[in-house]
Image (cartoon, coloured by chain):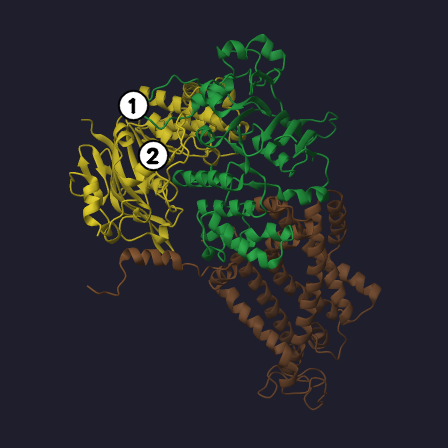
Amino acid sequence: MSQNLLEVHNIKKYFPIKKKLFSKKKEFIKAVDGISFTVKKGETLSIVGESGCGKSTTGRVLMKLLEATEGKIVFEGNDITGLSDDEIRPLRKEFQMVFQDPYASLNPRLTVKEIIEEPLIVHNIDKAKRADRVVELLEVVGLNKYHANRYPHEFSGGQRQRIGIARALAVNPKLIIADEPVSALDVSIQSQILNLLKDLQEKYDLTYIFIAHDLSVVEHISDRVAVMYLGRLVELTTRDELFATPLHPYTKALLSAVPVPDPTVKRNRIILKGDIPSPAAPPSGCTFHTRCPFAQDRCREQIPEFREIEKEHFVACHFAEELGS
Amino acid sequence: MDQPVLKVNNLQTYFTSDAGVVKAVDGVSFEVSKGETLGIVGESGSGKSVTSLSIMRLLKDTPGRIADGEILYEGRDLVKISENDMRKIRGNDIAMIFQEPMTSLNPVFKIGRQLEEAIILHLKFSKKEARERSIEMLTSVGISRPEKIVHEFPHQLSGGMRQRVMIAMAMACNPKVLIADEPTTALDVTIQAQILDLMRNLTKTTDTAILLITHDLGVVAEMCDRVVVMYGGRAVEESDVLSIFANPKHPYTQGLLASIPKIGERLDRLQSIPGNVPIPSRMPEGCKFAPRCPHAMDICWEKEPEYKEVITNHSVRCWLHEEVPQDESELVGSTQH
Amino acid sequence: MVELKLTKKEAYMQQSMENIKSNTPFSEFWRKFKKQKLAFVSFFFILFLIALAIVGPFIVPYDIAEPDYNNVLTGPTAEHWAGTDAYGRDIFSRIVAGTQISLYVGLTSVFLGALGGTFFGLIAGYYGKKVDAIIMRGCDVLLAFPGILLAIGIIAILGPGLGNVIIAVAIFSVPVFARIVRSSTLAVKSTLYVEATKSIGAVPRRIIWKHIFPGTLSSIIVYFTMRIGSAILTAASLSFLGLGAQPPSPEWGAMLSGGRDYLNIAPHVTIFPGLAIFITVLAFNLLGDGLRDALDPKIKD
């Protein structure tokens, strides 16, 4: 068997735009427009990009919260793409999600115990075991049993995120998709949660798909990083490779745009012109050509292939070789 | 030395609710001079935004009020002047930009009209002059087709464009002080880089003093000359940006700096500050940071330390620095039994 | 020094540990509800009415059906606080006894209506698409009739009588509840915690009843309370028209109807039952208003 936990083949997710009266042509927002990657067992793959790049949609498609328009998702060797809600339900305990907003992702009317118990009830764990498991989970994520009977509003953001993580862990998943799990948290709390995620990964042999926009966080947590722009992957490689020798001009700009918390560093920053185009009307050819400092005619016409330029280093750029050197 | 344009002295802003009085800001002092950028750093609940709202006297619609302290703008105490006088200062002398530009732009008016209104109100320009000034301002903030943008509504612009418009609007009347409350937090990194670049260039040419309120230490390092660190409604440390980053004195600042992941630095575990951000209604009695502080001593729980200048241009509110100690660790050791 | 006093450090630590006595959503609601003075008073008035409805018929000073031809149409006196009607029956006693009927009609009809409406609203809101279209268009049709006309139509088919009044009022309450429940279902359905529940693999039935329904409950309660007032009013109107409770019954609407002929010579025969209807409906509406303010998550202090 392959050591790939998850394989994603060319998935697309189009959202239809409300048709205008009498207009026959159907229009779509191409939130995810053909991305492929694999996730190895036990690794952390990060998907980075700016707002509207489709990274959260990708997460939801992988979670089967949204149905892919096209493409194939293979989990542990089984194609799960076409499965109905009923067929996917027993599989759901294998992959769980941690959400960005720790305030909105917990039902305010349930106690912490009820929230963490929910996946256990759904997956038919018997009652006697559930109570122990809840206490155990609370301790695993750094809370204690006294917290079990409280309501979410009594907790701070960081503690709520811990509750969300406990819920995700409840049914012993193999894969956790974390959608910006720390971006809503205070700086001093972020690192607690990141450390917790790392510890849990080691302890339970978890595989993470970590969706984020903050490159410094991504560098800290990932093994491999995929960079997304307007619904497509533009670069995918190991963390070390990506931060040392980024090849795609967008990755370079993204890296250079991150403010460095060190006033002695003065850098030559690549400042991209213009805004991110709308995914409803993406530019022709390479979608990045409108902002790319190196854009040529070819970029405007031809969609660059997502190709393996070196081992484990995929880039979608016509001029990756020239720009890299 | 330059006279400071804005000087805040022991500001105290309290919020009253049925749970009692919450001291959102309790003892914050700082000053900004012409052309200087002062960063105010803090996490949620640190009181940094309330500080900026207090300076602008925008607490009217909230249960908050300024309980004590003074806010001196060119020698005038903004706490004491009438609402009418304040209105003249607001937007004209002190301008503000917010995190989410959409909430401060009126969705039903075109961009041009909103800009012109502010200009006509404060600078007494004619309609035609105001239009010219608007277009000039929009050009200066890097908007490429200002003649077209003035005819558009806020929702037709992207987040970055809106923030540019907000900056244009804030800068239109040549304010002496610009308060920027998390101006780039809602923006993407590549757009943030554009906006920060723009703010840097603008202030270089206009000599405006900037009060930059943020939680992002990266932004602080790049933009600010001086930094005030806030925690639990207090200013806990202030110095120039180089000293704060190279030689932080308050344990909170130290912890904060250590806990942020930095690009190019690979650690197995990040350092972190234990515990949670304090809830304003349940603050400890002594030093507000004591419950999370690795150096907390008995005195820290009993009594709040004073905000003191320990070395030139470096103030800190911490018992570790109350007497100038020979050796910090020695002091810590000697007070623990 | 041996001292039992806690240091400030210990006090703070203990305080943060102690805080496990948590505010349940109910205690939070009760705290806010108590601040709504008018609603709070209405609440106790309604409790009093309910008590009256239960024991009223046993404690009234006069027989409510026995005619007394010596005291016909007398105005309010010390013996007859609200006077007597055309048969010499004590109006005060009849009003007290009638409380039972009005509350029974109001509560049952609205309860049945809410039950049906909530079910349809949840289904329509959760499943959307065709199910939603069919249910909501059905509601639109029902809502296109003025309420009282619809009720008269239903009575015309089923025949007059109190039981049929309940059915009629229940039926025209269904679409109103369905609409309200549907809109709050849509709101709750789009929250992140419902998405989270979906992602752990919960079946739709569980998502609807355990997660969405409690979220819609506050608007149901508010509307339920307000609706009781208008149901009492409608039931009284139908009885007034002779379609509901029949004359010997001390139903308030029927009493109004009975006093109609003597409006000039004995206005008290209509005024007192009218007053009872007015106060009761008002109390339910005020309570509903107060509940809305206390339950609405948007009004936070």
Work out whether residue B128 or residue A52 is closer to the camera in this orientation and state it.
Answer: A52
- Residue B87: image quadrant is top left
**Tag shown at residue B207:** 1
Give me the chain that's green.
A
Work out whether residue C68 or residue A225 is closer to the camera in this orientation and state it.
Answer: A225
* Amino acid on which disc 1 is placed: Asp
Circle nearer the N terminus (1, 2): 1
Work out whether residue A217 or residue C98 is closer to the camera in this orientation and state it.
Answer: A217
Position of residue C79 measured from the top left corner of the image (x, y, whole percent):
60, 88
**Tag shown at residue B257:** 2
Give me the chain that's yellow.
B
Residue positioned most to the bottom: C70
Q: Chain of mark 2?
A: B
Dot 2 lies on which element?
helix
Dot 1 lies on which element?
loop
Q: Is residue C275 left or right of residue A21?
A: left
Which residue is found at the position 53% from the left and 42% from the top? A204
- The Cα–Cα distance between marks 1 and 2, rounded to whole angstroms, is 30 Å
* Amino acid on which disc 2 is placed: Leu
Q: Is residue B131 visible?
A: no
Badge 2 crowding class, 10 Å Cα cut-off, few under 14, some 14 to 19, many 20 or more, is many
Position of residue C276 measured from the top left corner of the image (x, y, whole percent):
62, 73
Q: Is residue A57 left or right of residue C14?
A: right
Q: Is residue B324 left or right of residue B15?
A: left
Q: Is residue C116 visible?
A: yes
Give me the chain that's brown.
C
Q: Chain of mark 1?
A: B
